[in-house]
């Protein structure tokens, strides 16, 4: 491991604030920016150290880009450096999402704004579908992965509230066979505490990509009556057009439920599991896991299950976004454009809004 407590905290804060404010394109794009700054430009740690942390962060639950920020910051300046890096990465998009939520909650939006948001919903769904297809490509020729993904899709459609169980259970089945123990804990009564606990559970089961949090949150917040399917999809679209991790969707949900206090509580809940795991568990795993085969087996089951659950959530959100023939045609056009041109996701979402307003 690289020595720690050597990089000034102000330098770490500046680098990760800049990445968080300009990092469009999802977790892989954010991780690439972190690698460029930490390894190639500033040599805070070696490429080998970065890759080891990356593999383990992919296997640990939690938003990937946020966890890599924590890991790089900890390797560069100790535990406090990890916290500074993690907060720096999410702070710009967290503040943007609070602003969007306040604007969205005014309740009297201009007709052109309403039309723009409707188009963004369609674009958001197109981006999710394209992301699912991209995530599935590495598993396309793997029948075992296909079985895990299909089983998770079916189970999620039938029991969406148990989505974490399908993901972790798939990983355990891949490791040790068909044995797993299920359990579920109810939500707390206080809105802020309920938001914190719900998002804590979500942050504890996000494997590989922030989109993995969508199925769990969509099921929880709509069943609780916190947001409608339409409001959830609006928040998701706004989260996708802001830089930084998509998991700052938690700020939008929390603000809609309980104002600023709710937004802060939801964000703390979302990112606290990553802080605990990366700053507490990851250093030990880095020492003990090199060459461990069970981690690869767990990933082989868990990640296809994540993809199946995301696809199930997409099917659940589709009626809210595709409520008319025009919306369906726009969705098909955006899918084709995405496959042919590979534009960034945020541009697809904005394009959906522009086309809706123009036509």
Image (cartoon, grey):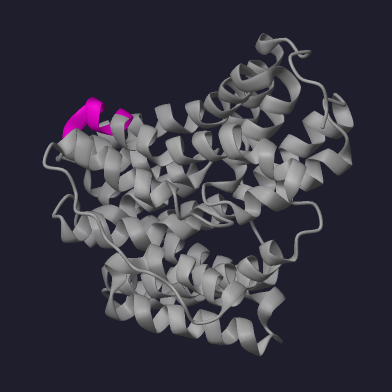
Q: Quick one: quadrant of the C terminus?
A: bottom left
Q: Which residues are magenta?
A: 258-264
Q: Quick one: quadrant of the N terminus?
A: top right
In the depicted view, which residue is nearer to us: 98 or 294? Answer: 294
**Relative side of 343 to 183, left or right:** right
**Relative side of 349 to 223, left or right:** right
**Relative side of 148 to 159, left or right:** right
What residue lies at 13% left-to-right and 55% top-to-bottom? 225
Q: Is residue 334 visible?
A: no
Give x and y (percent) for residue 229: 24, 61
In the depicted view, which residue is nearer to us: 120 or 97? Answer: 97
* Residue 260 is inside the magenta segment: yes
The relative height of residue 301 versus residue 346 in the rendered view (above or below) is: below
Give x and y (percent) for residue 308: 48, 75
What residue lies at 26% left-to-right and 50% top-to-bottom? 114
Q: Main secondary structure of the magenta part?
A: helix
* Residue 210 is inside the magenta segment: no
Give x and y (percent) for residue 326: 34, 75
Q: Is residue 117 visible?
A: yes
In the depicted view, which residue is nearer to us: 187 or 344? Answer: 187
Give x and y (percent) for residue 20: 58, 31
What residue lies at 34% left-to-right and 48% top-to-bottom? 235
The relative height of residue 97 versus residue 26 in the rendered view (above or below) is: above
Q: Quadrant of residue 216?
A: bottom left
What residue lies at 67% left-to-right and 78% top-to-bottom? 139
**Relative side of 244 to 111, left or right:** right
């Amino acid at each position: 491991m690289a020595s720690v407590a050597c990089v000034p905290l102000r330098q770490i804060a500046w680098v990760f604030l800049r990445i968080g404010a300009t990092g469009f394109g999802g977790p892989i794009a954010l991780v690439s920016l972190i690698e460029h700054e930490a390894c190639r430009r500033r040599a805070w740690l070696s490429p080998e150290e970065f890759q080891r942390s990356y593999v383990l962060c992919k296997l640990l639950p939690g938003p990937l880009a946020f966890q890599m920020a924590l890991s790089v910051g900890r390797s560069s300046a100790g535990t406090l450096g990890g916290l500074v890096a993690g907060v720096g990465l999410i702070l710009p998009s967290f503040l943007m999402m609070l602003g969007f939520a306040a604007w969205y909650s005014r309740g009297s939006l201009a007709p052109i704004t309403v039309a723009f948001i409707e188009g963004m919903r369609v674009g958001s769904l197109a981006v999710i579908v394209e992301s699912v297809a991209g995530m599935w490509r590495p598993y396309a020729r793997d029948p075992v992965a296909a079985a895990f993904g299909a089983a998770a899709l079916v189970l999620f459609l039938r029991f969406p509230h148990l989505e974490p169980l399908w993901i972790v259970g798939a990983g355990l089945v891949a490791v040790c066979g068909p044995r797993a123990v299920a359990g579920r804990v109810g939500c707390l009564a206080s809105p802020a505490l309920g938001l914190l606990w719900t998002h804590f559970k979500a942050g504890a089961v996000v494997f590989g990509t922030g989109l993995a949090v969508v199925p769990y949150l969509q099921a929880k917040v709509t069943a609780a009556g916190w947001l409608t399917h339409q409001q959830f999809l609006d928040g998701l679209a706004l989260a996708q057009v802001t830089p930084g991790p998509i998991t700052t969707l938690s700020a939008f949900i929390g603000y809609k439920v309980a104002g600023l206090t709710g937004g802060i509580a939801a964000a703390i809940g979302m990112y606290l599991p990553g802080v605990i795991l990366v700053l507490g568990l990851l250093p030990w795993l880095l020492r003990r896991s090199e060459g461990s085969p069970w981690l690869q087996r767990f990933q082989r089951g868990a990640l296809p299950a994540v993809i199946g659950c995301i696809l199930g959530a997409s099917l659940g959100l589709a009626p809210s976004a595709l409520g008319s023939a025009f919306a369906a045609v726009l969705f098909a056009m955006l899918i084709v454009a995405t496959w042919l041109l590979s534009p960034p996701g945020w541009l697809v979402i904005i394009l959906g809004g522009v086309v809706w307003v123009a036509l």
